Image (tube, rainbow, N blue to C red):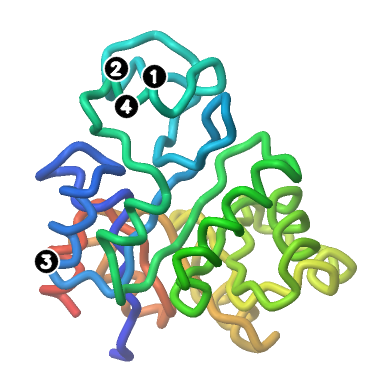
Amino acid sequence: MQTVTAVAHRGAPYRFRENTTDSLRAALQQGADAVEIDVRLTRDGVPVLLHDETLKRLWGHDRPLRSLSADEVRGLTAGGVPTLAEALAATDGSQVMIDLPGPVDRRTVNAVLDDVRQCGAQDRVHYCAGAEAMLAVRAADPSAEIALTWKSLAPPRPGLLDAVRPRWLNYRFTLVDRDLAARVHRDGRLLSVWTPDTGRSLRRLLDLGVDSITTNRVDVLCALR
């Protein structure tokens, strides 16, 4: 088996609440090569870690993030939702995959990229999301490392690939078979997958030769690897 990059999906969510600094640190202690985080903007334009549009599922407040200031988010969650800058500090020296849940506009992309630059983290951050978001990232940063998330067996259009210039194609793991893996590699790109959690699924993907696996059970992946 080749060495696969082990990416911790939102940290170690079986041990700590997802997208928190405790979760990120725990995943790195479990052996993760990288952590995946979800970043959205508060009302006042601060990038923070949250996958959902609201605080309801994780924090019990049915309040849209976009309606809250960063200070209000901090108060409602007792500081549990970190800013992107805080997350980058907590993962100092480690690789970070920033997912941008939609909708993503230029304001969001610029705020995220500005924080990454100010933290001096350009060399250890790459970005993943669908075509619209990754086109915006590429326009804002010609040197950004991109994993284009793709949810169809039909390959991305050549024009889109030329515009985004992804290093990685990022597929849901259930779509990946030997033919797809061979096609991605033949075209000179790396193949990343999300989010298998069972030992059986992880073994299958390792056997297929994928280059990166994003999982909620990074400890299991590291043990298999």
For label 3, count other residues whose C-alpha is less than 10 Å away and answer few (under 14), some (14-19) or many (20+). some
Left/right placement of residue 137 relative to residue 211 reads: right
Q: Residue at x 53, y 59 (%)?
A: 171
Q: CA distance from mark 1 to mark 3?
A: 32 Å
Q: Amino acid at mark 2?
A: Leu
Which mark, residue 74? Answer: 4
Left/right placement of residue 173 relative to residue 2 reads: right
Q: Quadrant of the N terminus?
A: bottom left
Q: Are marks 4 and 2 in contact (CB under 8 Å)?
A: yes
Q: Earlier in the sequence, mark 1 or mark 3?
A: 3
Query: Which structural element holds mark 3?
Result: loop
For label 1, count other residues whose C-alpha is less than 10 Å away and answer few (under 14), some (14-19) or many (20+). some
Question: Where does label 1 land, which residue?
Answer: 72
Left/right placement of residue 157 relative to residue 28 reads: right
Please state which of the two labelled residues, at mark 4 or mark 3, is closer to the viewer.
4
Measured as percent of width and height from the top left, residue 210 is found at 43, 77
Please state which of the two labelled residues, at mark 1 or mark 3, is closer to the viewer.
1
Question: Where does label 3 land, which residue?
Answer: 30
Query: Which structural element holds mark 1?
Result: helix
For label 4, count other residues whose C-alpha is less than 10 Å away and answer few (under 14), some (14-19) or many (20+). some
Question: Where does label 2 land, which residue?
Answer: 76
> In front: 185, or 52?
52
